Amino acid sequence: MQPTADFDPAHLARSLLRRSRQGALATLMAGTGDPYCSLVNLASHPDGSPILLISRLALHTKNVLADSRVSLMLDERAEGDPLEGARIMLAGKAEEVGEAGRELVRRRYLAAHPSAEAFVEFKDFSFFRIKPSGAHLVAGFGRIVDLKPAQFLTDLGGAEALLEAEPGAVAHMNEDHREAMNLYATRLLGAESADWLCTGCDPDGMDMQAGRDTLRLDFPERVTTGTELRKMLVRLAGEARAKG
C-alpha cells in the first residue's frame, strides 16, 4: 500500500514522537521470551528518541535489563474511532542512561511530567532511552509506511551550542514570554488559548504543553545555536502577531 502524494510520513512520525506523553511498551519476558506489554509515560530526547523513567521493581524494567529489545506503540489519541487516527510502532533497544547523559534526560522528562519530581530520585528508578532501529507508521488508507531512524530522528550534528543553550532558553520562554507561547499555539498551530509552556527546543522545532495537551512548533529552517534560536522565536512571534 503506497502513500498518497500529499502525505509526509517522516514529518508525521516526528510529530507523534515529540507530542506523545504515554505509550504501550512491549518487552520480552525474562526467561521465557513471551511478549509483555505495559503502559508507560515518556518524553523525548532532543533527537526525538523516547525517554522513559521506570522502576527496577517493575516487570517491564526487569525484562529490559535481561533483553533490551523493545517496541513502543504511540497514537494520536484522536476522538472517535482510535483506528482512524495515526499511530506509530517504534522498534529498537532500551538503553539505561549513564551519568553523563542523565542531567539532559532528567530535565526534559520533568518538563513533560512535572509530577515525576516526587520520585525521580528514588534509588529504584532509572532513565532509559529507546534507540530506534525503525518504525512502522499507519495513518489511514494508502498511508502505511516503514521508516528508517534517519527519516524521523533529528540530526544533532553541529548543534552542540543549541543544546547547551536550551535549558536557559526554555526557562526564559516560560518565565518571560508566555504571551508569545500562546500566540504560537493559537495563531500558528490553531490550538485553543491556554497556559502553554515550552518543554524543549531542538534544531527542528519547539515542543509545547498545556496540561495534557501537547503541540509541536516546527521551524521553517534548522537552528544550531542559541542566537539562531532566539532570532527564530522572535520571527515566529512576529508572524503570529501579523495573523491577528
Image (cartoon, grey):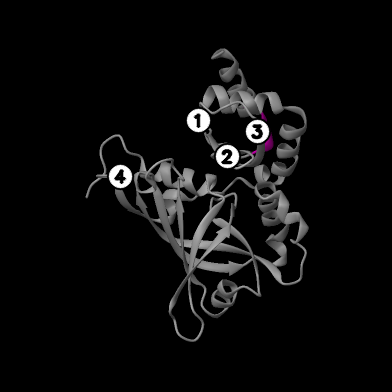
Label 1: element kind: loop
Cα–Cα span, label 3 and label 4:
30 Å
Amino acid type, residue under disc 1 in the picture: Pro
The mark nearer the N terminus, 3 or 4, is 4
Task: Answer above or below: position of 137 versus 222.
Answer: below
Query: Mark 3: which amino acid?
Result: Trp
Q: Circle 1 is placed at which residue position?
A: 220
Q: Is residue 134 visible?
A: yes
- What is the x, y in percent for residue 15? 48, 43
Mark 4 lies on residue? 140
Identified by mark 2, the residue type is: Asp
Say which residue appears at 66% left-offset and 24% top-offset: 180
Q: Quadrant of residue 7?
A: top left
- In the rendered structure, are the residues bearing label 4 and label 1 in contact, judged by CB atoms less than 8 Å apart? no
User: Would you name the residue on which mark 2 appears?
Assistant: 213
Give the alpha-carbon distance from disc 4 to disc 1, as whole Å: 27 Å
Mark 2 or mark 1, whichever is nearer to me: 2
Bounds of the magenta span? 225-231
Per the model, the C-alpha gap separating discs 3 and 1 is 21 Å
- Quarter of the rendering occupied by the C terminus: top right
Q: Earlier in the sequence, mark 4 or mark 1?
A: 4
Q: Secondary structure at mark 4?
A: loop
Q: Spatial distance from mark 3 to mark 2, Cα to Cα?
A: 9 Å
